[in-house]
Amino acid sequence: METQAPVPVAQKPARPRRRPSGARREALTGWAFMAPFAVLFVLVFVIPIAVSARESFFAQVSTSGDLYGGGQLDSVFVGLDNFLHVLTNERFWAGVGRIGLFGIVQVPIMIFAALGLALLLDSWLIRRVGGFRLSFFLPYAIPGIVAAMVWLYLYTPEISPLVDLLNALGIHVDLMGPGFVIFSMANMTTWTYTGYNMLIFLAALQAIPRDLYEAARVDGASGWQVVTKIKVPLVRGAALLAILLSIIGTVQLFNEPTVLAAVNSWMGADFVPMMMAYNTMMGQLSPSGAGPASAISIVMALLAGVLAAVYAVLQKRFTR
Amino acid sequence: MTTILGTLTRRRARADVDAPPRNLAPSRSARTLTIVLLIFALAYFLLPIVWLLFAATKSNADLVSSPGFWFGDFQLAENYTKLMDWTQGNFWRWVGNSMLYSGVAAVVGTLVSVSAGYALAKFRFPGSGVMSGAILGGLLMPVALLTVPLYIVFQQIGLTNTMWAIIIPSCVSPFGVFLGRVFADAAVPTEVLEAARIDGASESRIFFTMVLRLLAPAMVTIFLFIFVATWNNFLLPLMMISSPELKPVTLGLYGMVSYFAPQKGAVMLGALLGVVPLVILFLGLQRYWRSGLAAGAVKG
């Protein structure tokens, strides 16, 4: 792009760079540019979080309102009841367990696959990479809910070439059965996000100065050593970011189980915590309403925060 | 002009021409193995999409009986009719809704993000640290968890089941601000701003005529991220929208798949038609994706 900015060739006579009111003016201008985002952020993040935090101490209780003909719902302060109910609900912990298993399986597989593909595409082993790069990234363009629908049908025995292939290989497994459905969900997520993470790794790999490879050559390093001693250590930052984002994504897993549960009713309305929060809010689970739903969301947000903090501490300890 | 984008394209171009030093040149077998691995990966990522293309042309009976990766009895027109019938003529309206919500959210969100990113990159003001912290918090927050609180608030102010319930939350993109800040740091030279100020240009004029022009590639990237995130969001419309005529296409399709005994070919055709606009946008602008992810990866 050409630079259209009017760059004055001759500077005007030196003036004091900032008048006394300069700092104040700068602050006002800065806030003027910040303000639209700040207002929206307060509206969309701060107020809902505050309201939700307050709601989590209340519950809708039907008062025996004979005067009004009964059935009136009132907000009643219930202290920590909503939180106690979440924390002692084994359905909730079962859901947490499922996303835990999901994360332990899915995140490492996806990150290693993404890193492996990025290393291959960045290597001297292959010349034309554009087509591969684009194809691996293409699933990311398919909305999660649509991808889940396509895979749902690919898991349906009568119509799926995937199931035919597995049967031909002598593998007979119910891809949507209770023992396997978590792995089927993991596959949906892996399909969608591997290419995205691969692009993160590729960007980091391309930022490595090429001189390092020249230096490695002079030192007589092999291609494999270039990968393990130069490339992998230098993309560590990108890997840590990708893992963190994947953990956060796992905590809020919703689309895939919701689509699968639409067909597999045994999965219920609370297969994962986010489904539980949604169905509690919408009155499909009891106790329902804003209070209990807020409590679930807050517990999950805290859990995500703790996970992220533990992860940050661990990675600091192991990288020093 | 030294944008991250420019640097990346140059690097790529250089990497394409540079051959490996002779003692690092890979063996023929390593090359073959690589190709095999990449083709396996290609099959994994593309075959579901290819299957979707074939499935969209089949009746329920043919989905069962014909080979998955070839045509059966060609039922595309019939599936289209079924799709229109089932959605009561709303299908294209849903696609239009998705375009409207994503488009408005992306345009507004991009301007807001670039403006905030510019403020953080180029101005010192009290509270900028707090805002940076808030943006980082927003980046790391599982946003789906925010949907329940948003629903509670929007219900109280009577915005549920309106387009604003989708558009307003989608405009707010901490990642957009982060990108805006990174790009403003890299692409807007402070000296140019100073010079314009000395020449008497007002701050708003500097922003709208110079800064936005310098940040044009960054804005395309931010636009893409917000547009796609809005289009793909399912939980937010699921909670907020109940009228059929306000649904975005993701929500409409979910209604079809969760309906008992659906015409699967028609559902797949709907899935296909519902992502076409997104895929076009995606393929047309893919280099902007890479620059956005590069900014995230290298800075993060």
Image (spheres, rainbow, N blue to C red):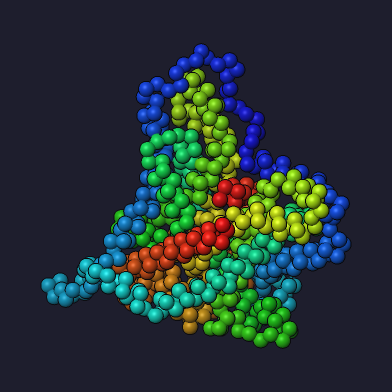
Residue nearest the viewer, comparing B252 with A195: A195
Q: Where is residue A92 in the image (x, y as percent from the top left)?
A: 40, 76
* B38 shown above or below A2: below
Q: Where is residue B145 in the image (x, y as percent from the top left)?
A: 42, 63
Q: Position of residue A255 (x, y in %)?
A: 51, 68
Horizontal side, residue B285 vs residue B185: left or right: right
Q: Is the N terminus of chain A in the top left, top right, bottom left or bottom right quadrant?
A: top right
Res. B63 visible in picture: yes
Residue at 58% over, 15% down = A10
Locate residue A318: give its quadrant. bottom right
Apparent side of residue A62 relative to residue B164 in the rendered image (left or right):
left
- Number of numbered discs present? 0
| Residue lying farthest to the top in this orientation | A13
Residue closest to the eye, B247 or B122: B122
Query: Is A87 placed above or below B90 here?
Result: below
| Farthest-out residue, left | A67
From the viewer's perspective, tell me whether residue B291 is left or right of residue A131.
Answer: left
Q: In this view, does A283 lie to the left or right of B220?
A: left
B238 vs A156: above or below: above
Picture residue at 67% right of the left edge, 69% below the top:
B48
